[in-house]
Amino acid sequence: MTLLSIENLDVRYGQFKAVRSVSLKVGAGEVVAIIGANGAGKTTLLRTLAGAIRPAGGRILFKGEDVTAMSAYERVKSGMVLVPEGRRLFARMTVEENLELGGLVKRGGDWSVERIFSIFPNLVKRRHARTGTLSGGEQQATAIGRALMTNPDVVFFDEISLGLSPLVVDQVYASLAELLKSGVTVVLVEQDLKRAMAVAGRAVCMLEGQVVLDRPMPETTRDEITEAYFGLKRGQSLGGAH
Amino acid sequence: MLNQIAQAIVLGGYYALIACGLSFMLSVMRVINLAHGSLLVLGGYFLWYLGEHYEISPFVGLLALVPLLALVGWALQRFLLERSARGGELLPILTTFGLSIVLDNLLFEQFGADTRSLAPYIGDLAWDSFELPGDIFVGKIGVLTLVAAIVLLGGLQLFLSRTGTGKAIRATAEDPDTAGIVGIDARKASAIASAIAVGSIGIASAALGMRATFDAYAGGAQLLFAFEATIIGGAGSLWGTLIGGIVLALAQTAGAAIHPQGFLIGGHLAFIFVLFARFFFLPGDFTYRLRRIAGLAK
């Protein structure tokens, strides 16, 4: 069943077209990795889906409803939530307060502060600490927890490994695997190809604002992804044409 | 000496009460509401009108005034501040300055230059006092005002830290864009914050009218005292506002003890001293430090 449908989406920053005629369908329970180089339009696409940016054209349908004109908070209420790049936590509020903010949406569901702490046990001892004082990994865990507290149907993860040490990234991805068991739909923007390929069931590669590859992960080779990632023609390597 | 300190603490409670709405708006919305004093006087006239024409006690009148002012605060945010904020952080301040001029002149046109007071409608409370050990007398209305300030500031602090709406308001104050992607309606949170800030002015209006007289242009002085208490206590801190009010009153009392004309000067000097001390001890460049002191930067 299609949960999220994107039709001919265009996003502009002034004259610059950051996302061009992107069409995409995401099924319920699917894990989709959007990959691409810097400036490919991945984050813009995700922020547009979350309602943080207004598209210049096209439509976004969520559970069959046109949500294109909906504001960000209305989309959260309907079941879409973004874990933004850079975490964007409320630094003057505690971990627990940040998590509780997600719960204010009152969508009803299984996620609670205690359940978040069971997935991220290292947050328990920091629950009353202001998030501005947390380590990068703890901040990322709080950002993910805050999003889950909205009891979402789909979560958009934007560069969750950015700025974190490899060890911390391992921990975050281990937690991600745990939450995927709950059946939540995930759209993941990630520059780390290896990690994205390990968790996702489908790869969508963007280049210069367009989708240049959209295939199930098991059928996609690393070479195909690399070619799409860098915009190479088939048989062309990064070192030059064969 | 003890008597003067006791009087100053009670007066500080009044300053904290009139600064409460200003401090709340500054701390959660980063807006210096220059119409604060005028709204305070407007509330005073409302209560006076009820007393004069319908013999309604100001305490009963508050039941109508607070919700009405809350409605004014909501409309102020939705129709003026929200729109003017799109033009930068200085535009809302200018907007409230314009609003204060309009209000002052409308009040003058309506009620003229005569001074008014709510004292005739509160019976003995207007002049009665408590006797404390050491032959110290403090006015009942002053004590009531101090208690009201503590209850109001404490209530607001509890509201912000314990309730969902309070947390949503704090989150919106910190980062309205991120609040949106967490599912918070930032427009609604700001409108509620403005309604609370302006609604609380009603209680200060009653205190103003009960302990003193006011006229259409009395708002400017009230705004100045409220602003000084807010800044002395630390812009953005509600409990700091109470301390700021008491410090301001103590400085005024000390000024008056030194020279008969020193009451206001003492307060202003304390304000300037705190301002300069903060400025020199804060980190960051000149502009950032100025904005921090005014409560416009985090």
Image (cartoon, rainbow, N blue to C red):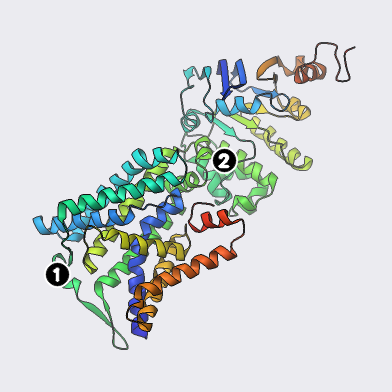
Q: Nearer the viewer, mark 1 or mark 2?
A: 1
Q: Where is residue A213 in the image (x, y as percent from the top left)?
A: 71, 15
* CA neighbours of label 2 inside 10 A, class few (<14), some (14 to 19), many (20+): many
* CA neighbours of label 1 inside 10 A, class few (<14), some (14 to 19), many (20+): few
Please tell me which residue is depicted at 65% across the width and 45% down the height of the picture: A139
Distance between mark 1 and mark 2 Cα atoms: 54 Å
Q: Residue A146 carries which label?
A: 2
- Residue B12 is left or right of residue A180, and the answer is left
Name which residue type carries label 1.
Gly
Q: Position of residue A49 (x, y in %)?
A: 56, 25
Please tell me which residue is depicted at 36% across the width and 64% down the height of the picture: B225
For residue A72, say whether it is visible: yes
Q: Name the residue under label 1.
A: B123
Name which residue type carries label 2.
Arg
On screen, B293 above or below B140?
above
Please tell me which residue is depicted at 35% across the width and 41% down the height of the picture: B80
- Residue B110 is left or right of residue A143, and the answer is left
On screen, A126 above or below A78?
below
